Image (cartoon, coloured by chain):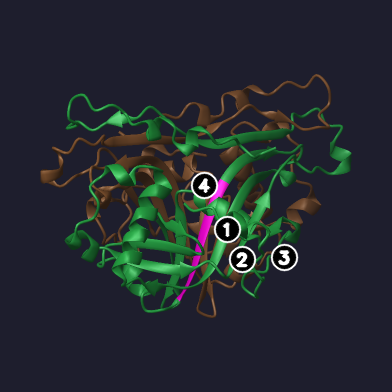
Chain colours: A green, B brown
Amino acid sequence: MTTSNNQTKQQLTPTQRTQIKRVPKRANYETQTIYSILDEALISHIGFTVNNQPYVIPTTYGRVEDKLYIHGSPASRMLRTLNQGIEVCVTVTLLDGLVLARSAFHHSMNYRSVVIFGTATLVNDTEEKMEALRAFTEHIIPKRWQEIRQPSKQELQGTMVLSLPLTEASAKVRTGNPVDDETDYDLPVWAGVLPLQIVPGKAIADDRLIEGIEIPDYLQNHPLNQLKTTSS
Amino acid sequence: MTTSNNQTKQQLTPTQRTQIKRVPKRANYETQTIYSILDEALISHIGFTVNNQPYVIPTTYGRVEDKLYIHGSPASRMLRTLNQGIEVCVTVTLLDGLVLARSAFHHSMNYRSVVIFGTATLVNDTEEKMEALRAFTEHIIPKRWQEIRQPSKQELQGTMVLSLPLTEASAKVRTGNPVDDETDYDLPVWAGVLPLQIVPGKAIADDRLIEGIEIPDYLQNHPLNQLKTTSS
């Protein structure tokens, strides 16, 4: 994903939908923060409504500058529905740690989340569509795109890509220690944070892999191998 | 969480909402599968609709038998809204691996997800409420509940607990290798699965921890330390 350094400190204006009301001190509207959460996470949860029935579907995504792209089969109900221009809510959550307080009441989690509101637009332009497809792959496995067979004309036509502007979005971040009632600090109970992190295991080669092909460096050095927990 | 062995093989009946239409071979309606995903994951994404606007909020939860509990402050807009009996969609996703195909088009992810539909009910009964609070703590840190200061009457009153029946739910599971176009298997590209797993780091003691309190065994032996990836 492109990290736009010149967007450091750029703030989104909170709207009625993105203004964080619960624990507002955890709110963050900086594009830098929002983009970094989107780039680090792998899965979004996409919410949309049909006949007053909400649906929440887990989906991968890609980011290019101030646009979030989602994609799938043109037969996907979610994509077909979103293509009608209805309101969507995309939420991305990174779980950074379990927060163990001395009382049950103050147990919590450290997390970084982003909530995006807006309406999606169909991407018809072939160049933008290809760029979005590149973003999907590079988002989950940086440096993979150059090595694989890129989409054929038929595959490109058989993929629906929608774009969502990252203009109405907010981040919410909790870090650090538990906050206990003052009278509970004397309790002889272990308290603190158990940091959590998504970690890759050993890569498993496909049964039909051609002999002699080694695991690529970019997989050994996948960003998930290099992240540090931010739980404390 | 309680695992009810006698519910092995019990199936939920798919409804119009839970019938999986995209890639139906990945669908699973067994309560055993659904419960095990709910018990292993730590975060749900809760979808609800206000004035045609969908919201998706990340939230912890607890399961007791065939009920899912969520909780929070009575000031929470989400809980107040759900307490009006509107339709809710709760989605829980475990990401098990990145699936690297030889073509961009066939890249995928291994995952296990659950989608639950229904309406939530306020838990007023003190005993059930306390049992739900126990479930929240035990869900994220088994064996923690017995050691911590349990909720006071005031805290119990200051916590809103909602219950959602696990009767209209489905799981969706992808496992295993990439599936490439037959003509792509000759390409000299590494293909396979990069398993992913949430792993705890080193526990970080609270600054104000009483001297001499050791990290408890149940934290060292947290279930997340013992899980095996199911990506292959």
Visible residue check, residue B207: yes
Tell me the residue that label 3 is attached to: B75
Answer left or right for B72 relative to A208: right
Q: At label 2, which amino acid type do we have?
A: Met
Callout 3–callout 2 Cβ contact below 8 Å: no
Callout 4–callout 2 Cβ contact below 8 Å: no
Answer left or right for B149 relative to B5: right
Tell me the residue that label 2 is attached to: B78
Q: At label 1, which amino acid type do we have?
A: Val
* Label 3, label 4: how far apart the Cα atoms are: 31 Å
Indicate the secondary structure of the residue bearing disc 2. Answer: helix
* Label 3, label 1: how far apart the Cα atoms are: 21 Å
Q: At label 3, which amino acid type do we have?
A: Ala
Mark 1 vs mark 4: same chain? Answer: yes
Q: Closer to the observer: label 4 or label 2?
A: 4
**Looking at the image, which is closer to me, B126 or B177?**
B177
Q: Which mark is residue A114?
A: 1
Magenta range is: A87-94
Residue drawn at x 31%, y 45% as measured from the top left: A146
Mark 3 vs mark 2: same chain? Answer: yes
Q: At label 4, which amino acid type do we have?
A: Glu
Visible residue check, residue B68: no
Q: Position of residue A117 (x, y in %)?
A: 53, 70
Q: Chain of mark 2?
A: B
